[in-house]
Amino acid sequence: MYLGLDIGTSAVKAVLVDDTQSVIATSETTLAISRPQPGFSEQNPADWWQATLASIDALKAQNPTALAAVRGIGLSGQMHGAVLLDAAGTVLRPAILWNDGRSFAECRELEERFPALHQVAGNLAFPGFTAPKLLWVRKHEPDIFARTAKVLLPKAYVGYCLTGEMVDEMSDASGTLWLDVGARDWSDEALAATYLTREHMPRLVEGSAAAGRIKPELAARWGMTTPPVLAGGAGDNAAGAIGLGAIRAGDAFVSLGTSGVLWATTDRYAPNPESSVHAFCHAIPATWHQMGVILSAASALGWWSQTANVAPGDLLAPLGDAPSKPSRATFLPYLSGERTPHNDTAIRASFIGLDHDTTREDLTQAVLEGVAFAFRDCLDALGAAGTSLTQADVIGGGSRSRFWTAVLASVLGIPINRIEDGERGGAFGAARLARMAATGEAPADICLPPRRIETIEPVPALQQAYADRHGLYRALYPALKGVTS
C-alpha cells in the first residue's frame, strides 16, 4: 500500500494506492490564500501541515487497515513557493507563492548579477520562481533575510514536518533558478547571485529515491507498525507526468487545468529560455522535460461561465462534439498575464471581432479556441527548442469536453488522446514515486500509461482555417500590449 499527497494551492489531496495501482481511498482538505497587497499571494506553511494531517486522518477513518499497511509516502506539490526557516527550523514569514508577482524588478536584477542564468537554470527569471523572491525579501525585509537559514519549497516543508529532514528533489528544485538543471545539482553561482550558499538549501535526491522515514510518533498516529519511507516526490506537473506514464522521450500531454501546460519528456537538457519554455529535470533519473505554460486555461472557461452566469456544462452543450469552423470571434486568454511565449505579467484578455450577430455560443467557442491558440504558441516554442510532438494526451478538468479536445487536435495539428480518469492528478504520481522509493522497482515497470478511451485526429480543412485564425491571434498580441501593459 502506498500514499500520495499533493500539496496544492487550493487543497491538500491524499490517495491510497494498492499493489495493483488501484486507488482505494481519497481525501481532500481545502486551503485559503492570503493577498495582503495587489499582486501578492501567500500561504501559511502551518496550514499545509494541518491540512496534511487532516487528510491522512480522514484516510484512517475511511480505511484504517489499508493506511496501516502503507510502505511508502510520496509528495507532489505546488512549485516555486518560498518557505523561509531560521536556524531552529521555525518559519519566519508566510510563504510567497508561485502566483505572486511582487518580484518583477528582482528578476532583472538576478539576470544582471548572473548573466549565465538562462543556460544554467534553463529558464528566464519569472516573478513566480523562487530565487527572485529572496532578492525581494533581502531588499524589503532585511531582518527576515538575515535570519534565514534554510529555504524550502512547499512540499519539502511538509516533508520536513513528516521526517524532520530537509530534502528536496530535482523536478521541484528546477523551478527555483538555483539548480544547474543539466548537472542536477545546486549552482553555487546562481545561489551567490541571491546572496545565498548551499548551506541554505535542502539536500537533493531523485524523486523516486528515499528521502527519509516518517517520524515514529506520526506512524503510531496512523497505526503504522513500521514508519514508511518518504520518496523525494515531484513538482505538480512532473508528478502528473509520472501518473500518466510520461517518462520516455517524446511522451507529451496537454493539461487543461486552472492554468495550462504543454509537456514534452526529453532524454537531454534542452533549454530555450528566449521563448519562455521551461526546461526542468523530471522526477526520475537521467530524464528531463520541457514545458510551455499558459496562465489561464480551464480558468478562462470558469471566468466566462461566471460572467455569463451560465454553468460551464450549459455553455458547452450547444457546441456539440466537434467544431465545423472557427468561431466568428477571437479571444485572447490573458486574464492573468501570460508566460509562454510572452513572459508578460501585465497583458490582459480581450474579445475581438464582435458584431450584432455574435452569440453566446460564438463567445464560448472563442474562449476554447483562444486557450488552444495559446497552446499552439507553446507548441511553436517547443519546436524552436528542437522538440517535435507527434501526439499528446489531454488531462485536467477541461479534458471532459470532447469539443475542446477536438479544437485542440486541429489547432495543434496532432492527434489528441482522451484517457481514462484524466483528472487523476499529482497525488497518484506521488504514490507511484513512493512505491519506487520503497521497493526499488524501475520506473518503466511502475509508470504505466492509462487506457486511452478515444483518439481525436486533426481535421485537415479545420487545420488550415485554424492556422489562418492563429495568425490573426498572434498579430493581436502586440496591438493589445500597447493598450493594456
Image (cartoon, helix red, strand yellow):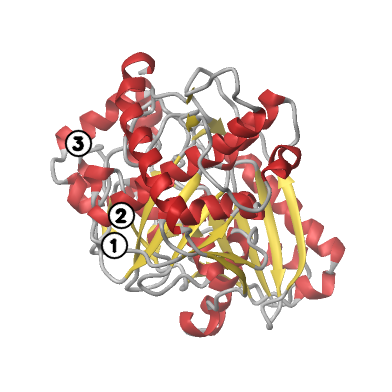
**From the image, which quarter does the C terminus lie in?**
top left
Under circle 1, the secondary element is loop
Q: Which label number is shown at residue 387?
A: 1
**Cα distance between the residues tagged 3 and 1:** 26 Å
Q: Which label number is shown at residue 84?
A: none
Under circle 2, the secondary element is helix
Residue labelled with disc 2: 382
Circle 3: residue type: Glu
In the picture, residue 216 is in which quadrant? bottom right
Residue 95 point in image, percent of width and height: 50, 36
Q: Which label number is shown at residue 111?
A: 3
Is there CB contact under 8 Å for labels 1 and 2? yes
Against 288, is 375 above or below?
above
Q: Residues within 10 Å of mark 3 (few under 14, many from 20)?
A: some
Q: Is residue 404 in view?
A: yes
Residue 368 point in image, percent of width and height: 55, 41
Give the mark nearest the N terminus, 3 or 1.
Answer: 3
In the picture, residue 448 is in which quadrant? bottom right
Residue 229 point in image, percent of width and height: 58, 73
Which residue ends up furthest to the left in the rendered image?
115
Under circle 3, the secondary element is helix
Relative side of 312 to 78, left or right: right
